[in-house]
Image (cartoon, grey):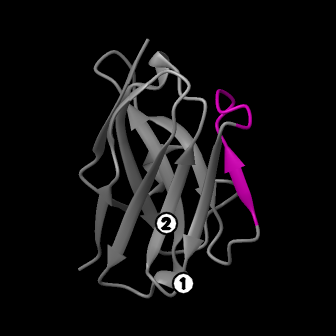
Amino acid sequence: QVQLAESGGGSVQAGGSLRLSCVVSGGIFSHFHLGWFRQTPEKVREFVAYIHQEGEYRAYGDFVKGRFSIARDNDKNTVYLQMNSLKPEDTAVYFCAAIGRSPVGVPKSAGQYEYWGLGTQVTVSA
C-alpha cells in the first residue's frame, strides 16, 4: 500500500521560507511521478509543482513565479518543496501526490494523481 506523509508546514511571516518534505512508502519511489498541490476552504485543490520520475523535468503553477522549487531524493524516498518569498495568499494546506504510471502530458490536475498524503498546513502572516 502506497502511503505519503508530508511534514515541514508551519507559520511564517511574509517574505519567509519553508521547506516541505514528503516521504513515500509502499512502492518503488523512483517509478513515481510526484506533485504538490494546495487547498484552501474557498478554492479547489490547486496545482503547485510537478517533478518527473527521473527528476529532469519540473513544472510549476503560474502563481509560483520562481519562488518555489521542487526536488526529489530517490535514496530517501522523499520529495521536497522549497518555498521562498512566501505571501499571505500562499496560506493553505499543502498536499503531496504521486502517480505510479506514466502520465499523459504534464499532470496539473488533481484527478491525474493516484496517491495522496494527508496534507500539512502552511500559514503566512502579513
- Of tags 1 and 2, the one toward the viewer is 2
- Which residues lie in the magenta part? 57-66
Q: Is residue 107 visible?
A: no
Name the residue carrying label 1: 30
The residue lying furthest to the top in this view is 126
Q: Quadrant of residue 106?
A: bottom right
Element carrying mark 2: strand
Q: Position of residue 14 (x, y in %)?
A: 49, 21
Residue 80 located left or right of residue 67: left
Q: Quadrant of residue 102?
A: bottom right
Q: Is residue 115 highlighted in magenta?
A: no
Q: Amino acid at mark 2?
A: Val
Name the residue carrying label 2: 79
Q: Quadrant of residue 86?
A: top right
Q: Amino acid at mark 1?
A: Ser
Q: Position of residue 78 (x, y in %)?
A: 45, 72
Q: Is residue 66 visible?
A: yes
Residue name at image x 53 percent, y 39 percent: 47
Residue 19 located left or right of residue 125: right
Is 64 in front, or is 116? 64
All told, the count of numbered labels is 2
Element carrying mark 1: helix
- Location of the N terminus by quadrant is bottom left
Which of the two discs, 1 and 2, labels the residue nearer the N terminus?
1
Q: Position of residue 32 (x, y in %)?
A: 51, 75
Residue name at image x 68 percent, y 72 percent: 55
